[in-house]
Amino acid sequence: MIRPSAFLLRGSISLIAVLALWWVLLQNPLLWLLRVSTEFVFSLLPAGNVPALITVATDSDWEFHVPVDDSRTPAQRGGAQPFARMEFSVPREDVLTYTFSLPLYWAVAIAVVMARGVTRENLRGAGKQLLIGTTVVILAEALCLIAFAKLTAYGGLNPDAWSKWWIDLGKYLVTQVLPFVMPLSVLLAIHRDLRMEILSYTRSGTT
Amino acid sequence: MRIARPSPVSSSKPALRPGRFVALFALFFLLGFGVLLAPFVQPAVLAFSRGLVSASGAIIRICGGKVLVEGPILRSETNGFAVEMKDGCNGANVTILLWAAVLAFPSSMLWKAKGLAAGTIAIQAINFVRFISLFYLGQFNMTLFDLAHAYLWEALIMLDAMVVFWLWVEWGGKRAAVKA
């Protein structure tokens, strides 16, 4: 059984430790991983067949080359040709947010092991869960970044007020909320005993 | 062979359909953030942020500190360092997530209402600690401030919200067991 107070204490300690490790050592490797995974996931999507979604400028900012479906009328485009692609630059510090989900997931996954007790049996199961969770978080980070890129690109096409509101909501969620909520959601999805402990349920109607 | 039987009345663990919980959580989550970002809500959000900054200033003064409150900005009287409470710093994000989880979880309306109220108070108490600690950390070291502001405190407060929800579920289960 995992106690909430034990989980919170261990989670906070492991979060500080993993965050320090990320800040000092892991930023560049995780940025590289994010770029590679994003390109891979994007290539699997429809209309993802582009030479490179992301290039890294000399000042380390990320330049996005996002294909768009410019369905505006000629009047809305001011007579210009429809855009096939939108290009924009994002500072490295802003992209870095998308690499934080992985250390956050590792920190809370470690907290689960510490709260359960560090035994051989617990560690064996935890290793497999950590691997699965890490893979899921990497893919989810890539999807968040792709969503951010697409929303930014379509936001640049001068949408109407209602579309702009949806774009702003989407960008807010993928930049301010999902990078922090997603690792905790993956933790609950993968760690069945923690999920059942927190949601405090039994399977209804079966024994 | 599994035999279907109803859950015992005296069980402290209510039946939960995880798929239903996730779907309702997602619905309330989207509704909550949709309202938060609606233009007509922005004046209320700004007023709420200003109120939090005033309260933070009052807490610091009670503890002997010297600060000025300028709307959503908290400024040190000693060295002029200032922090501004913007969207995301007022705990609204995390409160919406907690509310979505409480509303999605199967329980009585009264217990949900208690969870929403007590959960909001708990989150805002943690948020006060966050805001005031960042105010002093920024005067000490800006690199640590950036790290704590953008990442550490954001993650910690999300973790705290998850534990607050966990405690609310646990206490609700114990109440049900006692009543049964």
Image (cartoon, rainbow, N blue to C red):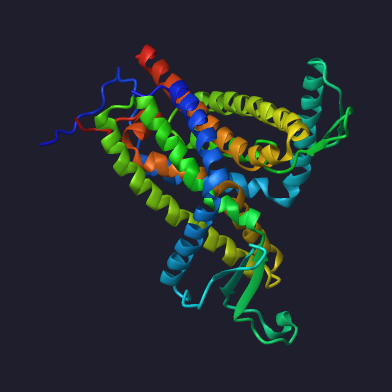
* Residue B34, visible in the rendered structure: yes
Front one among B83 and A120: A120
Q: Quadrant of the N terminus of chain A?
A: top left
Query: Where does residue B47 sit, x and y in percent of width and height?
Result: 79, 37
**Viewer-proximal residue among A72 and A46:** A46
Q: Is residue B104 above or below residue B34?
A: above
Looking at the image, which residue is at 65% across and 79% down? A72
Residue A185, quarter of picture = top left
Among the 4 quarters of the image, the one containing residue A161: bottom right
Q: Is A201 placed left or right of A156 in the picture?
A: left
Vertical position of residue A74 compared to residue B32: above or below: below
Judged from this view, the residue extending furthest toward the front is: A25
Q: Is residue B144 above or below residue A179?
A: above
Using the image, determine if residue A44 lies above or below residue A15: below
Using residue B50 as the reference point, say whether residue A125 is left or right of it.
left
Residue occupying the point 79% across, 43% down: B43
Name the residue: 67% across, 37% down. B144
The percent position of residue A85, horizontal first and vertical second, equals: 60, 78
Q: What is the tally of numbered marks visible in this picture? A: 0
Figure quadrant of residue B90? top right
Q: Position of residue A195 (x, y in %)?
A: 37, 34
The C terminus of chain A lies in quadrant? top left
Furthest toward the left, the residue is B1
Which is more toward the observer, B114 or B163? B163
Look at the image and tell me whether residue A142 can be seen: no
Judge by depth and name the residue closer to the eye, A153 or A69.
Answer: A153
Q: Is residue A23 left or right of residue A156?
A: left
- Residue at point 50% right, 78% down? A51
Q: Position of residue B166 (x, y in %)?
A: 46, 27
